[in-house]
Image (cartoon, rainbow, N blue to C red):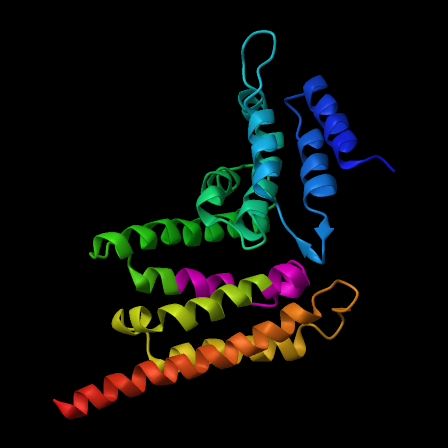
Amino acid sequence: GATNEEQIRLCEQAVSLEPGRADGYLELLEHVFLTAENGAVSLDREEDEELRSLLSRTDAEGRTYENLLRENAEEYGRLAYELGLAYYYYYETEGNKTYAVKWLDAAAQSQSLPEKERVRAERLGAIAGYYTQIGLIDKAGDSTVSYLDYWNQLTELTAGNLVDDDNAMTALRMYQELAGQLYTRAPEFAAAGVSREQMKEQLAGIREHLQTDFLEVDLKEQGLEEMKQSLEQLTAQAEEQVDAVFSQAQAENEGV
């Protein structure tokens, strides 16, 4: 088969023939960059630079490839959606929400994407937006983020049967997001008025989804078994964290 360099070159040639179409970029993203290496899918820094330099190339009239794509709204929407997800979930394996925001916002505004994808892009974009703001608060010390709004976005994002609506990988990632945020942000959510019961209910919901929604999915074949197990652990840790936060608050109230 072709080496990685050859595959990249072939995709770039395809793009330069029709820079206003998404196919060449998507081929590069999905079949060259987002292939599992050592069991993990990731978009690394070099691949990101490769994509950026491709989008900023210019044609004979000096128009960038990205602008040519943007003129073709349907193609731009398709690429924006896939790039948004790639950055959100896979950049350097962990995902980079800040890099994802621009693409998710573009996908959310696309008139041609299926509604389900548009809504997902909108919600993920909102969460990514919170992330960028939360980073600023931690430095400045004063909160402009409404943790209640943030909580509502998270819980909406994980409602329903995500395996059916989407796929097993996305479902696990979304539940991971919710459990992870409960683990790290329980005090902020509590301060914003989210009750212990509401938090526990969401964690119980994740457990239930894990038991019922994945029955038809071959997790081993998709390499998701490990991810599911670590999510089960994270959910248990988040539950302990929630209990600890409310017990501490209770003790402080009684001590007053």
Where residue 81 appears, as percent x and y from the top left, is: 58, 42
Q: Residue shown at 42%/72% (left/top)?
A: 183
Q: Which of these two is toward me, 85 or 184?
A: 184
Examine the structure image and report whether residue 256 is included in the region drawn in magenta: no
Q: Quadrant of the N terminus?
A: top right
Q: Quadrant of residue 175?
A: bottom right
Q: Main secondary structure of the magenta part?
A: helix
Which quadrant of the figure has residue 48? top right
Q: Quadrant of the C terminus?
A: bottom left
Q: Position of residue 138 (x, y in %)?
A: 28, 57
Point out the stretch of residues depicted in magenta. Answer: 152-172
Residue 167: % across, % down: 67, 60
**Magenta highlight on residue 163:** yes
**Is 7 above or below relative to 68?**
below
Q: Residue furthest left?
A: 256
Left or right of 5 on screen, residue 109: left
